[in-house]
Image (tube, grey):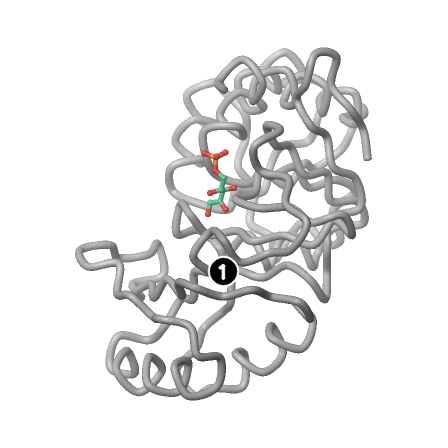
Amino acid sequence: MSEAKKRAAEKALQYVEDGMIVGVGTGSTVAYFIDGLAQFRDRIQGAVSSSEQSTARLRAHGIEVLDLNNAGTLALYVDGADECDPHKRLIKGGGAALTREKIIAEASKVFVCIVDPSKRVPILGKFPLPVEVIPMARSLVAREILRMTGGQPVWRDGVVTDNGNWILDIHNLSIVDPVTVERELNQIPGVVSVGLFARRPADVVIVGGEPPTVL
Ligand code: 5RP
């Protein structure tokens, strides 16, 4: 699996151009991308990072990490996913970085998603859907999720996001209309963000087969 992740990440380097500010996601696939991005260190302006974990790796390679507030619209965002459907809609947040990932995806012109072949699914939802919640609203949000979706929300006990919040993972969902589910879950007071990337899906998906496929 890690070879497939590496192949997808290396293919994504083809989207990096001189002078760019590159949005960088989080996870084991993105770690390969960051390692490859090091060779562009002196040719790009820098990176906007989606997590403390990615920031540390970027800095270890000498890549400047910039504040999104000063970066404007980004030309490129590269990130992994936990699931990807045929319409390039995604479940993300297995690494608990979904909120910053969603902000950067929204701020980017081109979102390139890098995955190994196991992440491709016909319908999203087998992977438990992560939802970032304000801690005091955890039980309220869990009850609402159960009522609205019938899925089983499970608290990712012990995990605190980079934003100081908690994660609920919704099990047993089959998400046939991801745009609606994303919109409705976003309405629950206390929800910070939902790990469905359907309203703003990926633009390009690179599957790290041998050779990699670009969808
Ligand atoms: C982190 C994410 C990751 O992109 C997702 O969990 C995939 O991770 P990996 O590349 O390690 O399989 O959304 O919040």
In-image side of 41 versus 11 (left or right): left
Q: Residue at x 43, y 60 (%)?
A: 130
Q: Is residue 154 above or below residue 148?
A: above
Task: Please say if 128 is above or below 15.
Answer: below
Q: Which x, y percent locates residue 178?
A: 66, 67
User: Which residue shows up at 70% across the image and 56% down it?
Assistant: 107
Point out the image quarter for the C terminus: top right
Residue 104 position (above or below residue 179): above
The quadrant holding residue 214 is top right
Q: Amino acid at mark 1?
A: Thr
Q: Is mark 1 within 8 Å of ligand 1?
A: no
Q: Is residue 118 shown above or below 82?
A: above
Residue position for label 1: 99
Residue plotted at (66% across, 22% down): 208
The residue most toward the left is 158
Q: Across the whole image, how many numbered discs are drawn on residues?
A: 1
Q: In the shown orientation, is residue 160 left or right of residue 37?
A: left
Front-most of 23 and 166?
166
Across and down, in percent, residue 90 comes to: 63, 52
Residue 52 horizontal/vertical position (percent): 38, 42
Residue 77: image x %, image y %?
68, 41
Residue at 67 percent of width and 36 percent of height: 22
Locate residue 85 relative to residue 148 in the image: left or right: right
Q: Quadrant of residue 175?
A: bottom right
Question: In front: 111, or 194?
Answer: 194
Please tell me how crowded label 1 is: few (under 14), some (14-19), or many (20+) other residues with Cα within 10 Å: many
* SS under mark 1: helix
